[in-house]
Every structure is written in C-alpha cells, then in structure tokens.
Amino acid sequence: MFDLTITGGTVVDGTGADRFRADIGVKDGRIVEIRRCEGDDPGLSGEAAHTIDATGKVVTPGFVDIHTHYDGQVSWDDTLEPSSLHGVTTVVSGNCGVGFAPVAPGREQWLIELMEGVEDIPGTALTEGITWEWESFPQYLDAVEKRSLAVDFGTQIAHGAVRGYAMGDRGARNEAATEDDVALMARIVREAVEAGALGFSTSRTEAHRAMDGQPVPGTYAAERELFGLGRAMAAGGQAVFEVAPQGTAGEDNEASMRELDWMTRLAAEIDRPVSFAMVQNSGAPDLWRRQLDCAGAALERGVQIYAQFAVRPFGMLFGFPGYHAFTHRPTYRRLAAESTREELGLRLADPAVREAILAETDLPAQPVPLFDGLFALIQHSTDKIFAIGDPPDYEPTPEQTVAAIARRRGQDPLAVMYDLMLEADGTALLMLPFFNYAAGNHDAIYDMMSHPAAVSGLSDGGAHCGLICDASYPTFMLTHWARDRDRGPRFSLEYVVRKQTLDTATLFGLSDRGVIATGKKADLNVIDLDALTLHAPRMVYDLPAGGRRLIQGASGYDATVVSGVVTRRHGSDTGARPGRLVRGVR
C-alpha cells in the first residue's frame, strides 16, 4: 500500500535528463517506486491511499530556494509564503550576514533594526512576531524544530549576529576583531554548524546598512577574521560560506574582483563551497563575465566557487500602496495620514487631488527611513521605469518606459507615472530595474544561467517587503525561460528544472532531495505547464502589527508535495504541515 501515487505524469526528474512518462509511488515520505508508462506495463505494484492523476501534467522535484530571509517569519508563519506559492519545498535562510541568533539578552531590538535596514522587513512585525525562545544558535535551531511548516527550513549562521554577540558594541561598530574576538566567534560558528547550520554568511557591500545607517557588522572584516570563521565552519561540518561581496551594488567595481581572490583562496584551503552574490550593474556591464571567468577557472581546478545570480532584472517595485515618487508631496502626506487604504485610492483619483500633487514640491524627508533617497531616484528615472502589467512583463522594451509613454501622449512623465499607478483602483505597480538590465534585455541573464559556476539564488523570499517580490523565481523560470521568452533564446524545461532542484540542493549538501529517484525524499510538484501563469505582485497587510508586504501568486500548480504529503492543491493551502527544520551534515 502506497501513501500516495502520482500517475501518468511527464516526469522531469531534476537531473537534466530527458523527460519521460511514469507513475510514482510514495511511502513514509520517500519515493519507493517509479514505473515508466511503456507498452503494456501494468503500472505500480500496489494500491494507494491517495492518488493524483497527472496525465498531461509535468511532475518535477520540489524546488530548493537557497537565498531567503525567513529567519523571523518562521516564528509566526507556518506557510512561509510567498515561496510556498511557487513549488518551493525547501528554503535556506540566514543569508547576507543578518539573522537572529545568537542574541545576547537585551540586544534583540538591535538585531531587528539590522534586519529591517538590510532587508526591508517591518521592524514592528519582527518585534511583535518573533518569539525569542533562544540565546545561542543551537537553541534557535531547537526552537524552529518545534515548528510544523508547509516547507522544509534550513538556515545559516550570520556574521552580523555573531559579531554583535561576541564583541558587543565594538562588533556592531565594525571595529577590528582581536585574536580573542576571532577565537570566540570561531567557537560560536563551529558550534552552530555542529548543531546543524547549513552555512555561514557575511555581507561586505556598502549597500547593506542597519536602520541607523551603520554598515552590517563584518563589512570591513580583515582576512584573518574571515579565514578564522571559514576554518571553524569547515571544522563543524559540510557547510557553505556565503558572501555578499564588496562591489555587489556597483559601489566599487574592482573590489568585486579583489573579493574573488580571497574567496578562492579560502575555498581552496577549507575545501568547502564559497557562494557569492553576483549581478550586472550598468556602470560596469561586463564585470559579471570576469567574475564568472574567475569562478569557472577555480572550478576547473577543483575549487568550489559559485556565483548566485538573479534569474530576472533585480530592482524595485513601487506604487501608491508602497514607496513612490509623490510620498513627500504635502497633499499626499495629508491624505495618507487621514484616509483608509480604500479611501486613499479613491481620493488620489480625484482630478483636483491629482493636479495638486503634481504641482507641489517635496517636503523635507521624514526621519525614518533609510529609503528616503529612493523617492528622488524614482522621480528622475522615468526613462528606466516600466509598468509591470498583469500578467507581469519582466523583459519590456524601451517603448514601454514611462518616459516613452509620456512622449507619445505629449504629457509630463510624472503625470504619466501618477496615472499608471492609479490603475487597478490605485494598486498598480511600476518596475525600476537596477541590475541585470543594462542592455534592456535578458541576454546577460541567459549567459549567467548557462554558466557552470552560476547557481540560481537571490530570490530574497521573506525580505524587501515593500520594494521587491522575487520569491516567484521558480514560476518565472518555468514560464519565461522554458516557455514564453520571445526576445532571445530559451532553455529546455529539463535544464530549468535542474537549475532549481539538483543544483541548488547539491550546493548545500542536501543529497536526499532535488531529484525524482527511488529512495529520495518525496518532495514533488505536479504542474499544468500550459496553464502555468505568474500573477501580478500586490500589496497585502498581513504581517504582525498590520505590516505590509508584497505578495505574488501563480496558477497552474496542481499539487505540491512535501515529504509525501500534499501541502497545496490547485493553488490552495491544504493545511498540511509536514515541513521541518533541515540540519546540515556534521
């Protein structure tokens, strides 16, 4: 008796091999039988408690997203949306040097403000939602292990939290670490990996700053500190050293190449993978090629260096529900303060209100945020801003920019921007791509995706709640890169599936998943590929304390299965929570 069978589907098994029709039998959370549908084959060898007819559908492994920020959300949300909406069955958190463990008593708010500044997760939501059942990193893992989730959750130990715990204010201020500091941090990192951390993460880019404007602790760490922590990580188990390098945001292009030097030497010494964030920036549009050439040469020598790349342009979404160009106009501020969300959309559509806001100048920026510079950037980037549309178009042409539309209409670009944001009852969003769009197309991303040293990452699931919604990468890869792209070459479905299953699972040593094979964990998707559709992102207000976040759904996922249990069926949550903490190999 099988617990579950999936019959008649076209299996894309995650290895990159050609697809085939087969029946799959699942028992006790594992794939126990795969029977190809050939000739007079009688099918699987037993009955099933539950059966999914996958005829005409594609069956894939569950997707493994290695770059998320659910470190706090895991305390209050057992669905871990939006990742779980897109066939993701395993997430890896704790990226970019920020996390919530270890934490010294009394320093919880400091970690919250660090995460809020770097990842744009509302501090009020983190304050209300995090349970703080831990001090040490092993205690954090134990707290997560008590949770029953819709997906499996693994995490890394973050440099910022380690520095703040071991060095206090000196660590927070990025002061140089002493020998004793490094030794203490090394003990903490090794203890974390021995307890099950999947890796160690650090951020060195100037773009990552806490709410008070201070760089993430570890931004300026010396090689002695980085190598000491890398050696400790390797001594603890089979973990990954993850880096957001200097120059990632285009602040110092040559620094990116200098970073590759020490990362390569570290990977060679500790014999563990080093993975770094890589995007194309318009100031040096071919720098990523040099980075991949270096990483590829290292791989050929047996040194494990991998670039995490984004599968579509990396930037920001904005509109009246979030950040936008008119945030500091007096009339907008007044209406936003005295209106409900529903009322605000209606009032902004009033022609007199529109005329007043467009005629006004900005008031001084208000003290919070860190993001105030974005408003001026939006106002002066109309030649780079696009209406994202529904379904969303992430590879628009130059004729679709706000400035181009304004020229055709004979209007002011800011007036056009205002009108575009008024669509969909004032909830429409526009897109400003910062990275991976220097040439106005996806050709550079195609080349990144083709490279053996590049691994799919940077979705930032759970983070950038008011600016970015890229946890939908898996659906975008299937639709855009394997089916719909018409402005350049596409990939085979087999290749696209492998890039987010076997390849991502293998990087983190998760050898029990990522492929459809007997004995492997029964994490599976049944997908109506012809009907698969990525929905437009939208703002919702469901975080603790009423915090807002962008969410993006999809249709066409007939079923998602975690450990043999159906967690989503025809786009709806079943309420099943088979997901658990994933501990690394000691």
Image (tube, grey):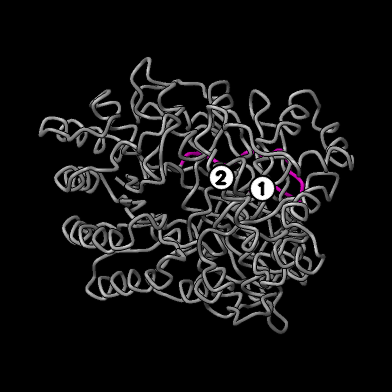
Whether the residues at callouts 1 and 2 have beta carbons within 8 Å, the answer is: yes
Q: Residue at x 32, y 53 (%)?
A: 246
Q: Residue at x 26, y 58 (%)?
A: 259
Which amino acid type is marked by label 2?
Leu
Quadrant of the snapshot with the N terminus: bottom right
From the viewer's perspective, is residue 421 above or below residue 286?
above
What segment is highlighted magenta in the picture? 565-581
Nearer the observer, 272 or 386: 386
Nearer the observer, 22 or 32: 22
Q: What is the secondary structure assignment of the residue under circle 2?
A: helix
Q: What is the secondary structure assignment of the residue under circle 1?
A: strand
Q: Marks 1 and 2, Cα distance to the nearest angstrom?
A: 10 Å
Name the residue carrying label 2.
Answer: 374
Numbered marks: total: 2
From the viewer's perspective, is residue 253 above or below residue 358?
below
Q: Nearer the viewer, mark 1 or mark 2?
A: 2
Q: Position of residue 486 (x, y in %)?
A: 68, 79
Near mark 2 (Cα within 10 A), the count class, few <14, some 14-19 or many ≥20, is some
Q: Is residue 286 left or right of residue 320?
A: left
Whether residue 27 is visible here, answered yes or no, is no
Q: Is residue 245 left or right of residue 1?
A: left
Q: Position of residue 268 (x, y in %)?
A: 19, 62
Q: Position of residue 554 (x, y in %)?
A: 73, 55
Residue 572 magenta-highlighted? yes
Nearer the observer, 278 or 378: 378
Quadrant of the snapshot with the C terminus: top left
> Sequence-wise, which precedes: disc 1 or disc 2?
1
Q: Residue at x 54, y 77 (%)?
A: 443
Name the residue carrying label 1.
Answer: 318
Outermost residue toward the left in this view:
179
Disc number at residue 174?
Answer: none
Whether residue 214 is visible here, answered yes or no, is yes
